Image (spheres, helix red, strand yellow):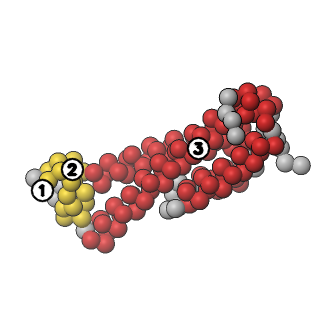
Amino acid sequence: MPLQPKPADLPKIPGALRLYQVSSIITGVMLLLLCAEVVAKYFFGTELEGGGPNGFLALVPEGTVTAVNLSTGLLIVHGWLYVLYLFADFRLWSIMRWPFLSFLVIALGGIIPFSSFLLEVKVGQKVKAFLAEHPVAQVESGVRA
């Protein structure tokens, strides 16, 4: 029999789900931007520059960035948002008491393009189905169906 969330943790589930869903969407969007940046850099030899002599935003040849290198900034921002995504994944996983493989699969959502969007829907449906069977979690947390 699979483990169930502890009764004391039931009111925490909606908040953990909300954090996971928001971080999943943000991380997914950043990952898609990162993929576009990688294509621009390695296939076309360009980097994204902000506030330089070529205008507010410009694609410039690789290594010629004179202002803010937004390509590097995108890498850094995605990395930190992925840390938030992992935290949200861990929080939801630990409250729901799912198997460790579930944690790993959800964690892959932040590094495989488009998978965070698919997993956000699937995980959200799974958690909402659990909440529908356990209305105590909704009443105590103030969330209504």
Where residue 44 sits: x, y (%)?
27, 71
**Which residue is more in the foreground, 75 or 137?**
137
Few, some or many C-alpha atoms within 10 Å of disc 3 (few <14, some 14-19, many ≥20)?
many
Disc 3 to disc 2, how far (Cα)? Answer: 31 Å
Q: Which residue is mark 2?
A: 50
Q: Which residue is mark 3?
A: 20
Residue at the spot x=63%, y=35% of the render? 15
Few, some or many C-alpha atoms within 10 Å of disc 1 (few <14, some 14-19, many ≥20)?
few
Q: Which residue is mark 1?
A: 54
Secondary element at tag 3 = helix
- Callout 1 amino acid: Asn
Residue at the spot x=18%, y=50% of the render? 56
Where residue 36 sits: x, y (%)?
36, 63
Q: Quadrant of the C terminus?
A: top right
Of pointers 3 and 2, the one earlier in the residue sequence: 3
Where residue 109 sits: x, y (%)?
56, 56
User: Image check: 83 left or right of 3?
Assistant: left
- Callout 2 amino acid: Gly
Residue 108 in view? no
